[in-house]
Image: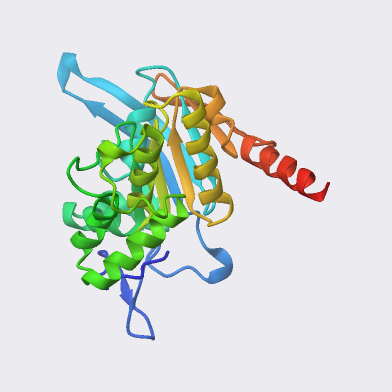
Amino acid sequence: MRDDGPQAPPLRGAQPSEEGGSALVRSGGSPDAPHAAPPLIRLRGITKVYGTGETAFQALKGVDLTIQKGDFVAIMGPSGSGKSTAMNTLGCLDTPTAGTYEFEGVQVQSLSRDERARLRRRYLGFVFQGFNLLARTSAQENVELPLIYRGEPAAQRHAMAANALERVGLKGWEHHTPGELSGGQQQRVAIARAIVTEPAVLLADEPTGNLDTARSKEIMELIWHLNADQGITVLMVTHEAEMAAYARRIVRFVDGMVESDERNPEPVGLLAGRVATAMGAD
């Protein structure tokens, strides 16, 4: 996992490496050998119950799910299917009632609240349907916010934020406020803010929900390239089949359980890339 910022204290269970840093200890108590590296994420028997007694509601019912590094997974399902609860669990925003959640072999459910927050800040980036930008703050300053929380020096923050904005196609728009940007541009700023810390995983919850068709396509193509070209693992909740078609894998939830988990042999982004390559050859 990448982390270019100041070193935070290791997660519980991390052991010193020979270089003086720390290595995450895998479930079972010993570091995995390089050839036997575990999946990036593994859910086993995840159950989530809200309430007690007669009012108890089981949102997740024994969910098993494995995510490999570099995957692009679309999570779909009707309202009440458990997809949002699953995303909150994956994003360390909620804890399961039962089951195990492993992040690179680390037992997440055994971490303290502070340790889960540290994992979230260092390794996860979030994009939501609402852009959640500070209205009176420039695009550059919005993108810098996670770096401020991480304690980056000002000069480093400025450079990293400018780079993130360039990666999402907003070079030259650094000093514009959200009110001066279109909806698609605002979501690009939100994506830049999510990736500025170089997260291992980008979690996107209905990222095109507030956008028209043209802007939705632009955002999905951007997310596709972040995955395909920059290697960011993407987990995306969507109810739109057109958006899910960009993913390499589609997981469908029904009644708190995984109904299907299928590979998408021809993601839209891959097809678009082939067309562009063919046109360039002509």
Q: Is residue 100 visible?
A: no
Measured from the top left, where is residue 240 in percent x and y?
A: 49, 22
Q: Which residue is drawn at 36% across and 42% down?
A: 90
Please give left or right for residue 29 compared with residue 92 in the image: right
Measured from the top left, where is residue 27 in percent x and y?
A: 39, 59
Q: Which residue is drawn at 34% across and 67% down?
A: 159
Q: Residue furthest bottom?
A: 19
Q: Can residue 158 be seen in this view?
A: yes
Q: Which residue is drawn at 28% across and 52% down?
A: 175
Q: Residue furthest top?
A: 54
- Residue 179 appears in which quarter of the rendering? top left
Please give left or right for residue 119 compared with residue 151 in the image: right
- Residue 48 appears in which quarter of the rendering? top left
- In the rendered view, tell whether residue 26 sits above or below residue 225: below
- In the rendered view, tell whether residue 170 sits above or below residue 235: below
Q: Residue furthest right?
A: 282
* Picture quarter with the N terminus: bottom left
- Residue 257 appears in which quarter of the rendering? top left
Measured from the top left, where is residue 218 in percent x and y?
A: 51, 36
Q: Looking at this view, is 221 or 230 the one in front?
A: 221
Q: Looking at this view, is 279 or 2 the one in front?
A: 279
- In the rendered view, tell whether residue 164 sits above or below residue 62: below
Query: What colour scheme has been applied to the protein in the rendered image?
Result: rainbow
Number of callouts: 0
Q: Which residue is drawn at 19% across and 40% down?
A: 135
